[in-house]
Image: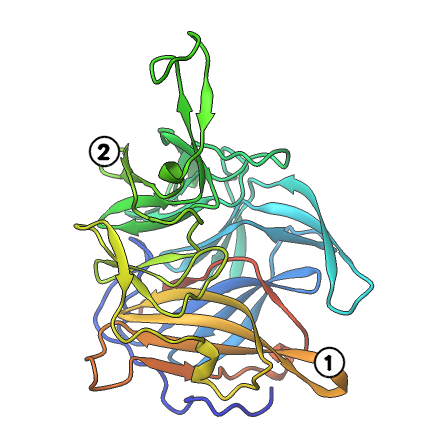
Amino acid sequence: MGSLHCNVAASPSFSSTGSSSGGDNVVSRDGSVRIYACFAHGSNNSLECYEPGANTWRRVGALPGVPDGHILKGFAVVALGESVYVIGGRLCKRERGAAAGVYHDTDVSVRADVLRYEVRRGEWQHCAPLLLPRFDFACAPCRGRICVAGGQCSLSGARGTAAAEVYDEEKGQWSALPNMSTMRYKCVGVTWQGSFHVVGGFAESTLTAGDALLTPGTTVLQSSALERSSAEVLHCSRGTWEILPGMWQLDVPPNQIVAVANRLFSSGDCLNCWKGHVEVYDGELNIWSIWDHSALPDLSLLANLPSSAQRLYLTMAAVGTQLYFLAGYQVPSSNDSFRTVSLVHSFDTNAPPGLEPAWSSFQPKMEPDDIEDESKELFSQCCSVQLSS
């Protein structure tokens, strides 16, 4: 992959105990943590794995059940126990364009399929499908189960759903949850303080005759910044939803939100996944603010990349008090072509101000077959799995 002068000598370390079954954050005992995300190499989806303790990045393999010449978009990747689930999504037919590295995608169908990858065995299984096919939805583990909400259920029209459901791994089945008060898609799911939060997204609420001066029996959909900046909170213990106005504060859907030590962190929105800093959410004040010492105009500054390098993707996972950013950059190669360089940037949310650097950067070690000589696309956010000793 060439030579990059990154800080790869010092591997990340971990401490404390915990489990990946209750939320986004994984707290490691012995460094046996793995971070998974799905990419597209040309016209094939691939699950990939980064191991922070060994600083290695490898391809796990193609997603089962995706036909040749097709790719999956808008699906969720979530960890529960020692398994990774790939849920729902939009199936697209992919055809190569005239220019190198250019593809044309045509929507085919919305999927309800659910795949389970058992990390320790390295085996795939087909699980019970979603009750409602969907893509671009919120998803997160909560109290040992998987919650999904919102998303789009049809390829015709840009309208979300208020429907929600939950997966019980022991029973191997999905059950319907009460509907949210708003229809949402491109929303983000995160479990925080024991509750499933569905944040932001393109949202619509329903006005009825009792809400405004409407003809009796008339239903009108309303979409405004008020809905798009709100969140809906599922209190898992009692199975009820609560609306939280202004939790996201922006009119643009979030990109990703993760929980670390009872705090929520974000790095950007769906239009700009890195805004130059990490933001933290204050639940009491209901505001987001810049986290100390996180400001960095461009994450590529952590590595000695060419000035012409362009970021292709960025996704974030929480491990202990660390935020890991899996990033890909397009850099010039020989014969006027380009190649992808994968890097991992980490930010220590507990770093003492001014005493030690909060940011580190690693160039992962790869097997020869996994070295990237072409462009690749990120098609899911990543998740963390803690393997028991």
Nearer to the camera, 384 or 242: 242
User: Which residue extends farthest right?
Assistant: 98
* Local crowd size for mark 1, using a 10 Å CA cut-off: few (<14), some (14–19), many (≥20): few
The numbered dot on residue 238 is 2
**Nearer the viewer's eye, disc 2 or disc 1?**
1
Q: Position of residue 331 (x, y in %)?
A: 62, 81
Q: Vertical placement of 79 versus 359: above or below?
A: above
Mark 2: secondary structure: loop
Q: Position of residue 67 (x, y in %)?
A: 70, 51
User: Which residue extends farthest top?
Assistant: 216
Q: Position of residue 29 (x, y in %)?
A: 26, 73
Mark 1: secondary structure: loop
Visible in this render: residue 387? no
Residue at 40% across / 92% down in the picture? 9
The CA span between labels 2 and 1 is 56 Å
Q: In the rendered image, which quarter contains the C terminus?
A: bottom left
Q: Which residue is mark 1?
A: 337
- Image quadrant in which you'd find residue 170: top left
- Left or right of 151, for residue 341: right
Sequence-first tag of 2 and 1: 2
* Local crowd size for mark 2, using a 10 Å CA cut-off: few (<14), some (14–19), many (≥20): few
Nearer to the camera, 305 or 371: 305
The amino acid marked with disc number 2 is Arg
Visible in this render: residue 303? yes
- Image quadrant in which you'd find residue 32: bottom left
The amino acid marked with disc number 1 is Ser
Q: Position of residue 344 (x, y in %)?
A: 45, 77
Residue at 38% across / 71% down in the picture? 324
